[in-house]
Amino acid sequence: MEFWAHWLWLIPFPPLAAAGALALTSRRRRRRAAVLAVGAMGASAALAFGAFASAAAHWGERAAVGFPWLQFGSRAFYLGWVLDPLSAAMTLMVAVVGLAIFIYSLGYMAEDENFVRFFCFLSLFAAAMLGLVIANSLLLLFICWELVGLTSYLLIGFWYQRPAAAAAAKKAFITTRVGDLGFLLGLVWLANESGSLLFYNGGRGCLEPQTVALLGARGAGIGGLSAAAAIGLLLFCGAVGKSGQLPLHVWLPDAMEGPTPVSALIHAATMVAAGVFLMARVYPLFGSEGASLVPHAMVWVGALTALCGALIAVAQTDIKRILAYSTISQLGYMFLGLGAGGVAVGMFHLTTHAFFKALLFLGAGSVIHACHGEQDIRRMGGVGRFAKVTFAAYAVGAMALAGVPVLFAGFWSKDAILHAAHHWRPSSLPFWLGVSGAVLTAFYMTRQLAYVFFGTYRGEGEPHESPPVMTRPLVFLALMAVFLGFVGTPALDAFGGFLSGERPRFELGALWEGGALQTMGLSTLAVALGFGLGWLLYGGARAAALGAMDPLERLWPGGYRALQNRLYVDEFYGVTVIWAQEAFSKLCAWMDEWIWGGLVAAWSAAAVAFAWLSRLIEEYAINAGFDAGCGGLRRGGRRAASFQDGKLQHYLRGIGVGFAVLALFLLWGR
Amino acid sequence: MSILAWTIYVSFLGALTVLLLPARGARAPHWAALGTTLLSLGMALAGAAAYSGGGHPTTIVRLDWIKPLGVQYHLAADGVSALLVVLTGIASVAGVLFSWNVEMRAREYFAFYLALLGGVYGVFLSFDLFLLFVFYEMAIVPKYFLIAIWGSTRREYAAMKLVLYSFVGSAAALVGLVAVHVQAAALLGRPTMDLELLSRLDFPVGFQVWAFPLMFVGFGVLAGLWPLHSWAPTGHVAAPTAASMLLAGVVMKLGAYGALRAGAALFPEGLQAWASWAAALGVIGILYGALVALAQRDFKFVIGFSSVSHMGFVILGLATWNVIGLSGAVVQMFSHGVLAGLLFAVVGRMVYDRTHTRDLDELEPMRLRKALPFAAGTFVVAGMASMGLPGFSGFVAELSILRGAWRAAPWAAVGAGIGIVLGAAYLLRVWHKAFYSDGGDAEGGLDAASALPPITWPEKAGAALLAAASLAVGLYPRIVFDLVTPSVKVILGQGGAL
């Protein structure tokens, strides 16, 4: 265990090295790039498996590493990594899903001229994401968090020639950075209060009981909050931004402008779940009495997002945007589970969701491939007949997402969340929000399936099945979407036991205890209701072609249009936040030009005026006086000079006069 | 260690040599300037590596100069000076590389350039307040000529504005300097201008409270202290590329360095009295600079205002007056020096010298990413570093400043944090507009852009040097923090015995 923890950095290293090598590789060396990237990811996956096996062998233990990165005498910023059940599970998930998506991308991006650059960015992403999950320091986590944000930006804008892609990339980066501001301030605050950003450090880490108790007891100075609660809320801001929760969810649907493997890896399976992971990682911080506000916030934000995301997904027509809103909704469920039921509940859904949502996105990519780049579901239809593997895999993913009972992973993980929400003391509303979301989930997936795979083909050309390099990852992920659920059933909660360190026991009786069966029944009912309604409206050939009205639109035009326009949140931000920022910028620019510039102009005008005044005084007062004095002197001189004219008679006359005057003076004076 | 002082002499000698070069040999002045700056950089690195004063200033040379006034020719260095000398070395080499296309009166150009550098090195190494002030004024004069002769947009106006602002600031600082001299003579019984000695004196609090703002604002003018910043953007825009690089990269640091050495370090209690004001000015500068940058149409003005924003972090770091915040401020000086240089190099040399426009609306249809991929890539790297992404120097500097600010005044950290978000916004905006736009319908722009001359080797070398410096600090920040932090502790009066 110690050995694995010590060498844990080797897991993100291969993709990082691959990214570096690919950055220097010529764009024509596509085969080499493919081998490098996939090989590196494979190495990471193998190492992650080793680390996971080690963590499983030392059930419930933890090994951490930390070292100073930046030192200010006694204070320092530390980095480090930790091997514990949470990081082991998450690392394995990221590496395995990542590997599947890397392989799939070989086929999906085969025609792209920037194939090498794509794998360079994707490898960099994988490295940063793996670094994020092994971090033992909030600072390292933040560093990787920013790097995954950067690679997300680069990959959303991968086809930057499309204005929509460039705009979406910018929007994603800036919106998540608004959340990151909270994260950064929380980090700085935590560093200030606890003196350490290491999570685990032999009793002195910021997640260890001593510090947690200290932070829970200390006041934050704002509205009676404890420091732990305030820091937790700030960190939650970062998570809200990254995980597309209300009110910062607006970037995620636009992010679908990126290539589909990117949507699958970054905007469905891993990066967007980083917010959930962050809150799971720092969950011990909320263990004290004073910090219970943070889980409450997670429950409410999560439940509302779960419902709103599902609602909006109902009225979208882009195959990827439907899935994007579904991701927003599912991330809401994760936060709901995290807040109401703790780390294991939220993380279990995160893990199963990663597999089935990656499956759905890759399936959607395969469909888009089949329909020659078409993304509008109104131009599809009947694709199931042409692409059988894709259809089967997609159907598995859809059923897992909807939570079809017993056989599919999504059922077990979502059920655990609903179960936790049901037992949440403060309010029963989140539970009902979650159940309504479950109905809607089944409904919009039915709608999508009906539009895409059933009925007649409404697009151009003939759809075709994707190559095996793309369908094989689909099959693998589909298998995971089925079997992964069985590690976290109430009867045998291996996943929860792994995270909490307890040995799981097989108890069939647990299925009947504590209302578990009721929740299961209710969620089964919700799924059935959603499927039924969906099939009633869209089943058979009732899906509408482009230009015709959607069946739901016919039933309820106003509501449908509001949902289609994403509840006008983007427009609302346009007239508030963005308007204010632009107005403020213009105001400052105006000030700079006219007030500060004007001040300078006024100063220089005053200086010039003073100079002129000085000149006038100089010229007409001082200088004129000087000139006058000089003139007088000169005239006096000239007159004096006229005496000395060289005529002897004049001199003699002068001597005579002088002599006479002297004689008179002497005579008279006596 | 004493080799650091030679940076001053070599620069001035280089300036003379360049002037005396024969008129033949079109590239001779360039090579001479490159040789001089490279030599200075080498000496700066060697000197910084040899520094072992444990944070205390180490005297290099001390001669009596004006004995009745106690003025000495006293050069010394501590970690802060050493780092800034290294920064000057790096920025100056890059500046020469980005001046490779200067043809008009090249000898005079490089003579002014090297004379400016001599003054800058002198400021960073002076430990006599009077000497510091002399070098400080010496640096201003060549700047005027560089802008007024080789500049572009409204160059006379900009050069004039810059010099007037500098002199107003200097006038305030000069008053402060005389006051210090009189007060110190009264306290010690003999006149002195020795900075080390002065910083150990306990000036009366009442005196500190009025003398501190004179020094802080007087030198702060050159650091782009809001609202006295308005010389900076116009000056940066009008200056030729290398002068913008030095102006933003190094000369603004002179102001910050002066405010630290002659302001805050001499009058810590004066700073305490004004700390909230100073922090507020820093935060306003950060936000205001970023907001104005968002609303600019001129590419170079965006970078000019971003300098105001980034220097706001330095001011804020000074105002925190704790080890982390102040170390962050010094590292931010280094980081901004390198990154502003890189950004101005892309805008002024790589783009403007080729396209002859800086109007973002005109650049948009040119699809410069296709025409100038190296420029686009460099700008992306510089932009990422500038917006504080981890892995680059800006992140560690701003993180430390925020950390220090949180201890001193949490509201300031919040304001500065918002500035970081805005920083991403304006950089992405120009990034998209100038390089990554779809080009719209204007096909003409593409044709015009396809005829652009390719990026030359000096540009590539200069960009690599600056980017590597930022990356090195970002990945292994101890190479600078281990130099700076002990000295910062001494400045703060927390250092142990020598």
Image (cartoon, grey):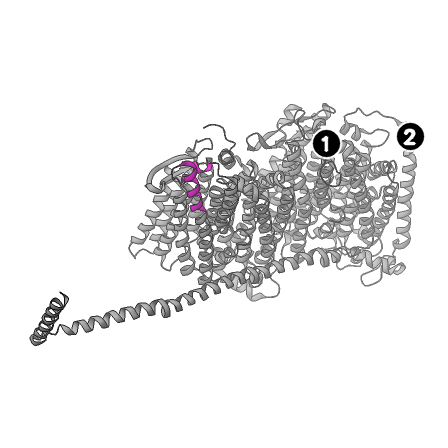
Looking at the image, is A331 positioned above or below residue A631? Answer: above
> In the rendered structure, the residue with mark 1 lies on which chain?
A
Secondary element type, mark 2: helix
> For the residue labelled by badge 1, is the local secondary structure a helix, a strand or a loop?
helix
Which secondary structure type mostly characterizes the magenta part of the structure?
Answer: helix
Contact between marks 2 and 1 (CB within 8 A): the answer is no
Q: Amino acid at mark 2?
A: Glu
Name the quarter where the N terminus of chain B is drawn.
top left
Q: Which residues are magenta?
A: B176-199
Depicted A172 relative to depicted A428: above or below: below
Q: Residue A84: x percent and y percent?
A: 70, 28
Q: Local crowd at mark 2 within 10 Å, few (<14), some, or many (≥20)?
A: few
Furthest toward the front, the residue is A670
Q: Upstream in the sequence, badge 2 or badge 1?
A: 1
Residue B271 or A137: which is nearer the viewer?
B271
The image shows residue B163 at horizontal and vertical percentages of 44, 56
- Residue A149 lies, with reference to residue A72, above or below; the image says below
> In percent of the image, x 66 and y 32: which residue is there?
A194
Point out residue A448 in the picture as x, y percentages from the top left corner: 82, 51
| Residue nearest the viewer, comparing B230 with A292 | B230
Q: Which residue was labeled with disc 1?
A: A86
Which label number is shown at residue B403?
none
Quarter of the image where one finds residue A19: top right
**How many marks do you count on the picture?**
2
For label 2, the residue is A513
The residue under label 1 is which amino acid type?
Leu
- Residue B366 in sight from this viewpoint: no
For the C terminus of chain B, the quadrant is: top left
User: Is residue A307 highlighted in magenta?
Assistant: no
Work out whether residue B320 can be spotted. yes
Choose between A438 and A471: the one closer to the eye.
A438
